[in-house]
Image: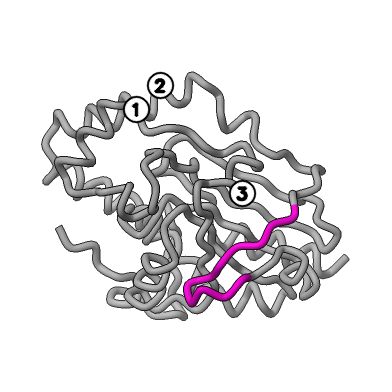
Amino acid sequence: MKWRSLEESISETEVRPLREIFAERKELIAKYVPAETQAVHARAIAELKKTALAANILPVGAKVPEFQLPDHDGKNVSSSELLAKGRLVLCFIRGRWCPFCVAQMEAMNLILPEIERAGATLVAVSPQTVQQSFFMRDQHRLRFPLLSDAGNNVARQFGLTYRVPDEQKALYQRAFVNLPFVNGDESWELPIPATYVIDRDGAVIFASANEDYTERPEPKDIVRLIADLSGD
């Protein structure tokens, strides 16, 4: 199945809601992915929701931990360096193999000029290796840094990490989603997708996370939030 790039289907002047793009991908999955495979993913999400992981993430008002991570080119980028430029939009994603992560990153890419005009910086963090981040940025023509969080050390400090359950792990292995290769470790650990807006002083202004990787905040809502803050 080929996941069509957003830039192949829409122009930058016609940014569609992310929920519509996700709905289309869900329809394709429902049509082409075997029902038993879909059931495995549904059970994994349901079990993860029972843990209420999203309810215990780093909350609004908390100070984010300082971090330094390599970007897609292997250059170290620090949180203090990013916040010195202004507010920070920080997206935690699973990796380039996830079609919903790809769609979210392409959608955020389309509104990047609006984020920057509002005085903020956008970066994405995933456990994938620097090389995988480079491939993702190049393939999808992303214009913002992709940071590699080896071992999910930063994601863990944000309260986002979980281990892929065995049933889903076996499914990924059969589908050639080789997380040990993509992430460079044998942990089979991922972050739940999350989006943070962080103020210049490192305080969390907005936090959104969901155990269901097919649900993400609307990019336009993030832009409106930052624009409103910049008008304070």
Q: Is residue 72 left or right of residue 156?
A: left
**What is the three-letter code of the residue carrying label 3?**
Val
Q: Position of residue 102 (x, y in %)?
A: 37, 61
The front one of 168 and 206 is 168
Question: Measured along the vertical axis of the image, is residue 135 above or below residue 68?
Answer: below
Three-letter code for the amino acid on which mark 2 is drawn:
Glu
Residue 135 vs residue 228, the one in the foreground: 135
Q: Which residue position holds label 2?
A: 47
Q: Is residue 61 left or right of residue 41?
A: right
How far is mark 2 from mark 1, CA to CA? Answer: 9 Å
x and y, in percent, of residue 9 in the image = 29, 74
Q: Earlier in the sequence, mark 1 or mark 3?
A: 3
Residue stretch rendered in magenta on the structure: 66-76
Ranked by sequence position, the earlier of labels 2 and 3 is 2
Residue at position x 77%, y 63% in the image: 228
Residue 75 coordinates in the image, percent (x, y): 57, 75
- Residue at point 35%, 72% (across, down): 135
Q: Amino acid at mark 1?
A: Pro
Would residue 154 be found to the left or right of residue 163 on screen? right
Q: Which mark is residue 217?
A: none
Residue named by callout 1: 165
Q: Give the class, few, some or many, for how many residues have Cα within 10 Å of label 2's Cα (few <14, many ≥20).
A: few
**Marks 2/3: CA distance?**
23 Å
Callout 1: SS:
loop
